[in-house]
């Protein structure tokens, strides 16, 4: 869906990777080999994938992440252009995005990921500006970039959403100042860290639990025939950011994002589902 002049604007700050995705009928044994039934090559990372979803839903998405201009960086650039996502490249000279090797078990849709994660993310980044955006999503990769975006968003009154898949030390700074946090059930939160006004916990196909300014509730996750769970969490975060940016209530935004995350699981890879929107 092409954005219009009044489409929601989202700033996404965090990780960009190159994902090499292999779909297999059985996971290889130790020191063994199997032949993939499908392979895909695409940009990846929580912030990048969420931005791609935001854009596919009709929003104007800007990704701030280190990508670089080498061979791997060009792959990410091309993917972002195809997805309609604008890039603010935080890379320093010689930087190359990390590669994630992803194996998807076809019978179950489960995935395994081996990656350098955010290793090599620059410590020093130019100031990030959130003015003019309707929402900012931070995935916690690149602490300097996340803090810069949070400061700007707070000053401009832009709601900040945290994608908290697993605990990172920077979350101790981000959580108390964010407006929303959408976490996985694996997120190990220290007891002494204050939470934002909206705090939601996803747990696969189980209901999403949330607290919205002291009011607690749950949102059911639609059941689907699972083909591939890879990127479902990123879809949920991107759709949630879109819904919040356009003014949806929290419970409605969670329902909207859960529906899209479940729908994504019916398709292989991280890009095929976007073509259905």
Image (spheres, helix red, strand yellow):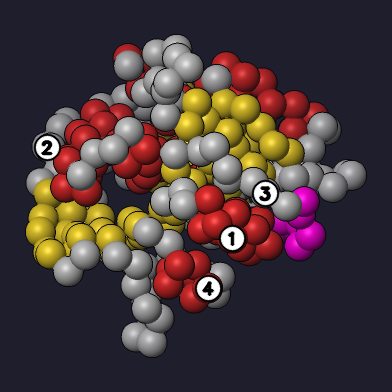
Ranked by sequence position, the earlier of labels 3 and 1 is 3
Density class for disc 4 (Cα within 10 Å; few <14, some 14-19, many ≥20) is: some
Residue drawn at the location 64% of the way across and 42% of the way down: 64
Please name the residue that numbered disc 3 is placed on.
Answer: 128
Determine the image quadrant of residue 227: top left
Q: Nearer the viewer, mark 2 or mark 1?
A: 1
The secondary structure type at the circle numbered 3 is loop
Please name the residue that numbered disc 1 is placed on.
Answer: 151
Density class for disc 2 (Cα within 10 Å; few <14, some 14-19, many ≥20) is: few
**Residue range highlighted in magenta:** 118-126
The secondary structure type at the circle numbered 1 is helix
* Res. 183 mark: none
Mark 3 to mark 1 CA distance (whole Å): 9 Å
Please name the residue that numbered disc 4 is placed on.
Answer: 173
Mark 4 to mark 3 CA distance (whole Å): 17 Å
Q: Is residue 45 visible?
A: no
Ranked by sequence position, the earlier of labels 4 and 3 is 3
């Amino acid at each position: 869906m092409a954005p219009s002049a009044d489409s929601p604007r989202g700033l996404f700050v965090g990780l960009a990777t190159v994902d090499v995705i292999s779909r297999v009928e059985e996971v290889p044994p130790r020191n063994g080999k199997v032949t993939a039934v499908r392979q895909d090559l695409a940009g990846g990372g929580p912030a990048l994938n969420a931005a791609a979803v935001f854009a596919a839903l009709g929003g104007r998405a800007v990704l701030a992440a280190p990508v670089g201009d080498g061979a791997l960086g060009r792959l990410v650039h091309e993917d972002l252009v195809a997805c309609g996502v604008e890039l603010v490249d935080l890379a320093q000279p010689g930087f190359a995005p990390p590669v994630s090797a992803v194996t998807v078990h076809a019978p179950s849709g489960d995935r395994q990921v081996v990656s350098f994660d955010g290793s090599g993310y620059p410590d020093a980044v130019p100031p990030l500006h959130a003015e003019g955006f309707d929402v900012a999503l931070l995935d916690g990769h690149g602490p300097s970039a996340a803090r810069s975006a949070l400061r700007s968003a707070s000053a401009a009154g832009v709601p900040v959403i945290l994608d908290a898949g697993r605990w990172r030390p920077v979350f101790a700074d981000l959580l108390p100042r964010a407006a929303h946090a959408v976490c996985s059930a694996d997120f190990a939160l220290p007891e002494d860290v204050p939470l934002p006004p909206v705090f939601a916990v996803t747990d696969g196909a189980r209901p999403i639990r949330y607290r919205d300014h002291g009011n607690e509730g749950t949102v059911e996750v639609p059941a689907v025939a699972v083909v591939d769970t890879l990127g479902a969490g990123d879809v949920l975060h991107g759709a949630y950011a879109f819904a919040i940016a356009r003014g949806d209530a929290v419970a409605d935004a969670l329902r909207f994002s859960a529906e899209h995350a479940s729908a994504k699981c019916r398709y292989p890879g991280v890009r095929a589902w976007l073509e259905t929107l």
